[in-house]
Amino acid sequence: MKEFDVIIIGAGAAGLMAAAHATKLKKSVLLIESNKSPGRKIIISGGGRCNFTNLEVDSSFYVSKNKHFVKSALKQYTNWDFIDLVSKYDVKYHEKTLGQLFCNGTSKEILNMLLQEIGKSAQINCDERVSEVLKTEEDGSYEVKTNRDLYRAKKLIVACGGLSMPKMGASDIGYKIARQFGHKIIETNPALVSFTADEDLKKRV
């Protein structure tokens, strides 16, 4: 069994950011990604230019039953922290409507930036799917079984994303793990949908 300080399930934007922070704390990190490459949603975001943050960010912009969590999260790592990171890697960007920031080039610049932040300090296993997660009674560590191997870590981060875009590898594994460890799941609803409206509806809206 291979052992790490931290196992992160999912190598999308959240998983890669988590890995970058963990490696800075000198932790050994394993990312497990079901897709054939990390950050696939980053690549397609913003029409291929990655709308990576916004100049105006406030807790009131978020719909949440726990507003204090949003305030705490935004205080610990701000939009300006990420803008500083982007500038550090000399990624050129521009402002669009309502303060949205997009890369001048392509989304790959943001993905490459995150991969460089992680460097060689983390192991990224792609095209690997988690089948089971167990918490050991012995020391409270986590055992993660995949279609390839069995791993153990002191800490586990579930960063699988939601159910949107199954063609991009989205699945319900994150929800299953959350339920397994007693977390309450709020019923999911479609949030990213496209629709066609006629002129009459446009006028009424």
Image: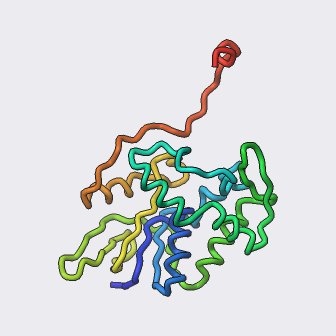
Which residue appears at 50% of the width and 48% of the height? Answer: 166
Residue 54 lies, with reference to residue 127, above or below; the image says above
Q: Nearer the viewer, residue 10 or 58?
A: 58
Vertical relation: 84 (above or below) 68: below
Residue occupying the far top of the picture? 200
Q: Whole-percent x and y of residue 140? A: 24, 77
**Front residue of this view, candidates 173 and 179:** 179
Note whether 85 is above or below 198 in the view shown: below
Q: Residue furthest left?
A: 137
Q: On the picture, is 27 further left or further right than 150?
A: right
Q: How is the image coloured?
A: rainbow
Position of 16 relative to 26 (above/below)? above
Tell me if 137 is positioned left or right of 27 in this view.
left
Q: Indicate the position of residue 147 as horizontal and vertical percent values.
A: 38, 69
Residue 135: image quadrant is bottom left
Task: State the residue at coordinates (37%, 71%).
Answer: 156
Q: Name the residue nearer the viewer: 56 or 45.
A: 56
Question: Where does the C terminus fall, quadrant-wise?
Answer: top right
Residue 40 picture location, percent across and down? 60, 59
Q: Which image quadrant: the N terminus?
A: bottom left
Q: Nearer the viewer, residue 18 or 82?
A: 82
Query: Residue placed at 48% from the left, 63% from the top?
Result: 34
Number of numbered discs overlaid on the protein picture: 0
Residue extending farthest bottom:
26
Residue 120 lies, in percent from the top left, at 58, 85
Residue name at image x 63 percent, y 60 percent: 79
